[in-house]
Structures are given as C-alpha cells and as structure tokens.
Amino acid sequence: MSKLAKALSAAAGNAGDANLYPEDVFSTYLYEGTGSAININNGLDLSGEGGLTWLKSRSLSEVNILMDTVRGVQSALVSNNANNVFTLTGGITAFNSNGFTLGTSNIINTNNSTNTSWSFRKAAGFFDVVTFTGNDTARTIAHNLGSVPKMIIVKSISDDYDWVVYHASLTNQQNLNLNTTSQAGNSGAEYWNSTTPTSSVFSLGTQFRVNGNSKTYVAYLFGDDAIFGDDGDEQICKFGSFTPTGSGTARQTINLGFEPQWLIIKNSTSTQSGSWWIFDNMRGFTAEDGSGSEYLLADDTGAASAFGGGSINITNQGFQMVNNAFVSSSQTFIYMAIRRPMKAPEVGTAVFAMDTLGSTGDGEEPGYRSPFPVDMGLKTALTGNQRQISTRLLQGTELLTESNAAEASSSAKQFDYMNGTDTSTATSTVNMMWMFKRASKFMDAVAYTGAAQSTLNVTHNLTVTPEMMIVKRRNSTSEWYVYHSATGNTKGNYLNYNYPPDTGNQFWNNTSPSATQFTVGDSLIQNGTWIAYLFATLAGISKVGSYSGNAGYAVNVDCGFSNGARFILIKSSGAGDWYVYDSLRGIVAGNDPYFFLNSTAAQVTNTDYIDPLASGFTVTSSAPAGLNASGVTYLFLAIA
C-alpha cells in the first residue's frame, strides 16, 4: 500500500470509514414512480456522511436532477442546462442514514415511470462537495477529499452559467461543459489558473462561470486513491482517456484493473457524439455482444436508449468499444469509472433466494422476489420444462442447462429490478426461480471471447480460488462443462448429461484455477462468446465439496452451516444425474422433491433421499446410487 493510501486509510478510519467498499459510497438504485413519497434504501449514509444524489427518468423525457446534502433538500440543479438552482418541492425531501426520501415531483416520480438514481457518498479519496462565493480574483478553494481530485464539476447556483468540468486527462488550461456536447476549451488561466489541483485545494482563475464576484457556486470533487476493500488498498474509481482505433468489427479494450458498475464517457476533442454518455450495470451494461447497453445522457433530457448489441461491452477488467459505437478513430474520449460491489456477504440470504411465480399475489413485477438485485437466475416449471439460466451481464438472453443449444432471446428487462427478476405478473405455484447475486468469495459470472488457440487464461473477480465452475458457449452449440475441485483439473463433467467425466487437457489444460484467473483448454475456447459461473466455499454461506457414499446407511454432510442448507446440487463423480433440492419445496424429515438440471422431466415428490442437518444436509439410507453408493465420491454445491 502506498504512503498516501495508508494516510487516507487512517483518515477514513478516524472518520469511522475503515474498510469501506464501493457499495458503502456509491449506489445505482432503480425505482418505479408512484406519484407518492418513496423511501429509497440504497445502503448509503447520506444524512451522517453527506453526499450527492443524481436522478433521471428512464422512460420519460425529463431533466437530470442533482441534489446534495450541503445545499440541502429540495435545492435542485439540472445537468442538461445552465439554469441556476431552483426549489423542487417534490424532489428529495430527506437525506437518510440508509438513502433518501423522494417527494411527489413528476420530474422524478411520475406514476408508473421508470427511473434511476446515482448516489455518491462523501468519503476520503472518493468524493467531496464544496460550496463557495466567487471574488473575480485568482485563488484556491479548500476541499476535504484528502487526495488530488481527478475530476471537478463546478456550477454557479446563483446564475445561469454553464457547468464547468476539470478532468485530469486534460491540461490545467482546458475545461469541458457538463450541459453541452462541446469539445474541450483551451482557456488558458481563465478557469483553473493554469494550476493542477492538490490534495487540499483546487485553483480558480477569474472566469465568471467558476469565480464571478459575489456569485455562489457548488463543486463536486472526485478522486481515485486506493483506500477501499478488505486491505484498504483497492482502487474503486478510475479516470482516463482513450482514442478509438480500427473500424468495422474491431474491438478496443480499456483496461481499468476492475469491472465497472458505472461509467461516464465524453468526447473531449469533437462535438461529434459529444454527449456525456452514462452506463451502469443495473440498467443493463452488457458483456460480450449482449443485447445492447442502455445509456442516459447528462446533457440531454431524453429517455433511456441503447446501442445495438455489442457496441459497448462491460468486461471483467474494464470496458470494450466495438464498431466504434461513438465515433470514428482519432478522437479522444475522457471517462470516469466506478468499480462494481466487492464486499463478501455475511449471510446466505443476501446472495441467494428462491420464489414461486407471483407468490406475493400483488400482480406487480417482478414475478420472482428476492431481497437483492439478481445477477443470475435459474427458472423452471416443476411439472416438467426447460431449465433456463439468465444472467444480468447478458440481458435479453437465456441458456438451457439440459441442452447444448446456443442461447435464445428472452426479456431484455428481466433484471430491471432491485428486488427480484422476471417481467411476468402471473401467479403459479409450480414455476420457480433460484436467484443468485454475484459477490466476492461466493459467486461470480464471467463472460469471455474464445480464440483459435490451445489454451486461454481468463481473469475473474471471485477474489478467491473457484472450487466449481460451470462454462457454456453462448453463440453456438456446445456442452456445459463443469470443473469441480473434487475431480480436479484433468477432468471435465457435463452439466447437460448424466455422463461420467471425461479426462484430458482440453477442459482446463490440466491447470487449477487461482484467485485471479482460470485456464481453459481448446474445448472451451473455440471462437465465439462464452459464459462461466464460478462458485467457492464461504464459511457459513456456501460450501463446494464432496462426500463418500455408504449404501444402506445415512451420510451426514457437514457444510459448516448453522441452520442447514437451503439449496443443494449433487452429482456422482461417475455417471449420474444432477439433483437439485431446496428448502422452499422442502428439505425435511420426510419426502423431499427434487429435479434434474440435465433433464426436462417433472420433479419427483414421493422420495425421502435427503434430510435436514443443522450443519448441512443428510443423505438418507434409502437414497439410490445416484446419491449414495458405497465407494463412490459425490460432488456438491450447498448454500445456507
């Protein structure tokens, strides 16, 4: 850790901020307008620590509203015009310890409208808000960011002046306007006094947009110093620039060193495609030629729109430009990116949930409810149907676990919720969904592109070594390949069959995964797009393991849980089906329903092969060879 990072960590700790994570200081929260007051619980302490919330309708043509804790509730600015501050009586009516409260304004809360909010909490090295009065004299303004600002946004709150933006990728004699598509201006000392900001002050020239005599201003400061994560040394925000290259199907990858959850891009050298484009992973920042990443514009009132599939992709280490989505080559773009959440869960219910379709009976979306935004869902009809897997990274598509078929289209908005998934409003007791949230040390989803080579290393964000990996080619037929630590790196199982595993380096290149990457052999890197789901053991929450069968006798499987397993996936290390059990249908001292992931057959409800066990689960003495044969090793994934 650098000396500056250590100093910032110490400062953060003194403020009660030790071991902050991205989800402690930034949130994208989607909500549906009601026309009535709404409490938005995004987990950020805005009342205690302070910050900024940016609101924009997705379904309506409405202005971008920015409100901060320094200026106070109902004091609104609009990023897409030069107007000064105005009172929005139905705007944010309270900043709370876990988010904020919305009023009834049609701008941000029209009944049945879809909307997004981006909240930035004050934190050392990440974000600060400063207000000041201009004096038309070159000067410095003190701030509390605690590190050198990499982007500063200044707006007069007393006059109708353009928003002015400083970005570290430009010189200290250049500026941009947040409310226009204009290219960077070369204004000399007018704006920033030709002086780069420091960790304690930023400089202003005499330009009236930033320092007019007796005019009042607000400045939003953003930094990128590493003070976050388990060890307090993870960079969660990055600023930079890139120049698009190539043409046609050429791809350009911008490596951030992390997967972003929020991204803003601006052409700084031309007005062509010169808007401030905003993407986030809640509205659909898709990977590897997904259905198309949704964007909003900071400088425009327009409703949300999306490029065609694959124009701009999120990657597990940054983002990728495809087909020059914004502009032809030779023009420079600046950007700000914020890392996706990285905190390990503390309880299983924070990352895994189950539900039957429309169980609440309220006739509202989403059809399946969970206490968290869903990143991957497994859906089936228990009376017999396809087992469908859909993924937030690949919005608008689904794969079938019992089939080698390529992905098919599904609802592009099925992950468009903070509390579940699926657009259906029907009710059914036999249609079920098993919902997973990506989280450090628990589960990750990785999209990657294959290549004509014999081996490929793929970076992941699980942060620990994967113990189980499920991999499928998306754009063409292929088997589902499964790695499990109990069978090792020389064998590959098939999720869509009950076959025994095959042996050979074509699966994992005889290389075990690590905490940062996994290796695939030539069967898993054919040209095309792929998706991989990674799982690990996390104490008290998940367990990837194995047990030895003992025919005619019960086998207790200790997973280290305190209240038993809620989800169990079991497969013989030889030939055998993939059994799925869960506590919603019943893991009891009696009959326990199960179905197979490798089959469309209806669930079986009249057998007692599994019993509850406080520390995990018990395989009963009556279980068949698929679950309990002497001398056979069984692979499993269990979630508390």
Image (cartoon, rainbow, N blue to C red):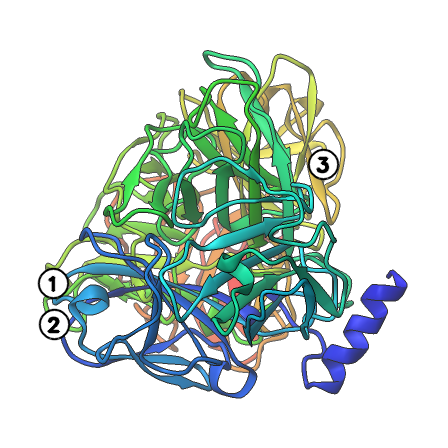
Label 2 – label 1 distance at C-alpha: 7 Å
For residue 44, above or below residue 400: below
Front-most of residues 520 and 610: 520
Residue position for label 1: 427
Q: Amino acid at mark 1?
A: Thr
Give the percent coordinates (x, y) of residue 155.
Answer: 46, 62
Q: Which residue is mark 2?
A: 361
SS for callout 3: loop
Q: Residue at x 45, y 55 (%)?
A: 163
In the picture provided, is 374 more to the left or to the right than 396? right
Q: Say which residue appears at 61% left-offset and 31% top-offset.
A: 242
Mark 2 / mark 1, whichever is N-terminal: 2
Of 158 and 280, nearer the camera is 158
Q: Amino acid at mark 3?
A: Asn
Left or right: 281 as drawn, with respect to 229: left
Which residue matches tag 3?
Answer: 489
Asked if the residue under mark 1 is in contact with the one under mark 2, i.e. CB atoms within 8 Å, the reply is yes
